[in-house]
């Protein structure tokens, strides 16, 4: 996307989305509002050292401050937030003590939006740690890095995710493995969902969309194609009238087949998208659970539950 990745392989996830997916001449704010947004964003990032200091002795305080910081940053970016949750109390209780959260991936703003709803650990691209501004946020939130170009590392990431949720933590994964524009989307890769099966933890599908002033789905926030992270931040900070909608659907039982679990989660988060199967772009064919992990299994021993296709 924005930076070349060394040792790329044939199964590296890709998306056909490009800057052609962006809306033409979207509503933007004036210079004064833009300056105020930047100042407020800098203040929000000023909270991050506090979060790191308070993280170990006061985890509840850290979570509260993280949520406040994320909501402040989201406000600074100019994105409103709506949360839809029609789950029953019983359904909510299944993921209250920790769960694997699954969402589609549209932009770097997804992390800010979901943190503003519920602070969690995120599995994200490894080079995010080195990005300006967002890298600092990633380090403070203890992001679990994953290098899609080095699939032999995938079983270790699965184990880390499983350990986090066993300990009662919430972990967010984006199984599409790359960003799409939001109107087009890719298949959910099953590999990371193995962590829910290994830890016998419920999975929480999350339907994430960005809407414009009329309530229609917009691609204005998408981070795709050759756009750099700096250009994306500058463009999105200027947008006006964007709202993020986060919908919690009924949790999915882990079961024993990660492919079935991925299919169930995809049905949950794509519901009512208004895209007929024949109209959907061709899905990318990368599947680390088949190619990468199985190849690694032939080279060195590992947990059978991770290596199984």
Image: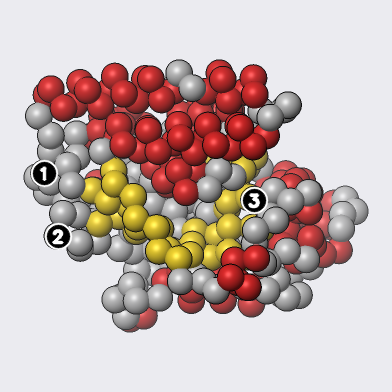
Q: Looking at the image, is mark 1 or mark 2 earlier in the sequence?
A: 1
| Real-space CA distance between mark 3 and mark 1, rounded to the nearest whole angstrom | 36 Å
> Which element type, helix, strand or loop, lies under badge 3?
strand
Q: Is residue 28 above or below residue 197?
A: above
* Residue where numbered disc 3 is placed: 170
Residue 86 bears which disc, if any?
none
Instruction: Estimate how packed mark 2 is, as few (under 14), some (14 to 19) or many (20 or more) residues with alpha carbons within 10 Å.
Output: few
Q: Verify CB contact (< 8 Å) between mark 3 and mark 2.
A: no
* Residue where numbered disc 2 is placed: 214
Where is residue 125? Give x, y as percent.
55, 40
Q: Looking at the image, is mark 3 or mark 1 earlier in the sequence?
A: 1
| Real-space CA distance between mark 3 and mark 2, rounded to the nearest whole angstrom | 33 Å
Q: Is residue 65 above or below residue 207?
A: above
Where is residue 89? Give x, y as percent.
58, 70
Q: Residue furthest right?
A: 301
Where is residue 170? Give x, y as percent.
64, 50
Q: Which of the two marks, 3 or 1, is nearer to us in this view?
A: 3
Q: Quadrant of residue 139?
A: top right
| Real-space CA distance between mark 1 and mark 2, rounded to the nearest whole angstrom | 12 Å
Q: Looking at the image, is mark 3 or mark 2 earlier in the sequence?
A: 3
Q: Is residue 82 left or right of residue 143?
A: left
What residue lies at 34% left-to-right and 44% top-to-bottom? 223
Q: Verify CB contact (< 8 Å) between mark 1 and mark 2.
A: no
Quarter of the picture containing the N terminus is top left
What residue lies at 40% left-to-right and 38% top-to-bottom? 71
What residue lies at 68% left-to-right and 74% top-to-bottom? 253
* Residue where numbered disc 1 is placed: 27
Instruction: Estimate how packed mark 1 is, as few (under 14), some (14 to 19) or many (20 or more) residues with alpha carbons within 10 Å.
Output: some
Instruction: Estimate how packed mark 3 is, as few (under 14), some (14 to 19) or many (20 or more) residues with alpha carbons within 10 Å.
Output: many
> Which element type, helix, strand or loop, lies under badge 1?
loop
How many dots with numbers?
Answer: 3
> Which element type, helix, strand or loop, lies under badge 2?
loop
């Amino acid at each position: 996307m924005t930076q070349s990745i060394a040792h790329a392989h044939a199964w590296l996830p890709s998306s056909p989305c490009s800057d052609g997916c962006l809306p033409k001449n979207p509503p933007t704010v004036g210079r004064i509002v833009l300056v105020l947004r930047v100042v407020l964003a800098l203040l929000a990032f000023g909270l991050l050292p506090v979060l790191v200091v308070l993280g170990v002795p006061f985890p509840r305080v850290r979570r509260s401050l993280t949520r406040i910081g994320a909501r402040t940053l989201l406000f600074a970016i100019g994105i409103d937030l709506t949360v839809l949750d029609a789950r029953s109390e019983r359904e909510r209780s299944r993921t209250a003590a920790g769960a694997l959260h699954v969402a589609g991936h549209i932009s770097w703003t997804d992390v800010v939006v979901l943190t503003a709803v519920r602070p969690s650990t995120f599995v994200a691209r490894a080079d995010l740690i080195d990005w300006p501004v967002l890298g600092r946020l990633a380090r403070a939130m203890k992001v679990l890095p994953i290098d899609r170009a080095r699939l032999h590392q995938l079983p270790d990431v699965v184990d880390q995710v499983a350990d986090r949720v066993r300990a009662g933590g919430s972990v967010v994964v984006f199984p599409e493995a790359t960003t799409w524009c939001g109107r087009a989307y890719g298949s959910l890769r099953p590999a990371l969902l193995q962590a829910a099966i290994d830890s016998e933890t419920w999975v929480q599908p999350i339907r994430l969309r960005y809407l414009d002033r009329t309530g229609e789905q917009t691609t204005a926030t998408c981070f795709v194609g050759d756009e750099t992270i700096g250009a994306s931040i500058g463009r999105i900070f200027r947008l006006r009238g964007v709202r993020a909608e986060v919908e919690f659907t009924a949790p999915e039982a882990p079961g024993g087949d990660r492919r079935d679990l991925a299919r169930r989660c995809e049905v949950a988060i794509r519901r009512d998208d208004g895209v007929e199967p024949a109209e959907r772009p061709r899905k990318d064919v990368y599947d680390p659970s088949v190619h990468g992990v199985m190849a690694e299994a032939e080279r060195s021993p590992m947990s059978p539950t991770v290596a199984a296709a």
